[in-house]
Amino acid sequence: MMKNSKRVFLLLLVLLFFVVQPGICQRFQVSHPDELKKALSQLSAGDQLELFPGVYGGISLKNLHGSRQAPIVIEGIDPNLPPVLKGRGEGLKLTSCSYIKI
């Protein structure tokens, strides 16, 4: 009886480890508009997108979701020289997105 209890306990621990373990977060550093487009298509919860100083086209994000514990962060690398987002009337547009920090 004790051996079965230990096995069940160990099995539950292993399952809990895989269920609770957060995904691997990525850090993207972008210095060119083409890199920005590629990085935006790969973002997921917990990721960080860092923009080098420069002028970028507008960003439009749709159905992109971080989480309370793992928001998506989009920021400039240098706070003294922030990136500029220039679009046709909108530099940044978020549609049906959640837990994104700009």
Image (cartoon, rainbow, N blue to C red):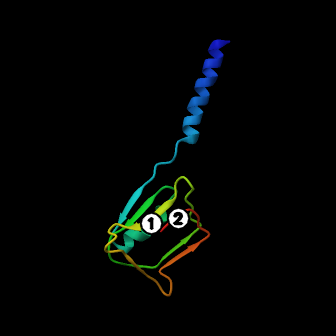
Q: Kindly identify the amino acid type of the residue bearing the numbered disc 1.
A: Ile
Q: Residue at x 41, y 67 (%)?
A: 75
Q: Residue at x 40, y 70 (%)?
A: 36
Q: Which residue is mark 1?
A: 74
Quadrant where the N terminus is found in the figure: top right
Total of numbered circles in the picture?
2
Q: Position of residue 83 (x, y in %)?
A: 37, 75
Q: Kindly identify the amino acid type of the residue bearing the numbered disc 2.
A: Ile
With 90 as the anchor, is 12 left or right in this view? Answer: right
Q: Residue furthest top?
A: 1
Q: Residue at x 33, y 77 (%)?
A: 54
Task: Say the numbered circle drawn on residue 100.
Answer: 2
Up-down relation of residue 51 to residue 56 (above or below): above
Q: Residue furthest right?
A: 1
Up-down relation of residue 74 to residue 46 (above or below): below
Up-down relation of residue 71 to residue 3 (above or below): below
Q: Position of residue 39 (x, y in %)?
A: 43, 65
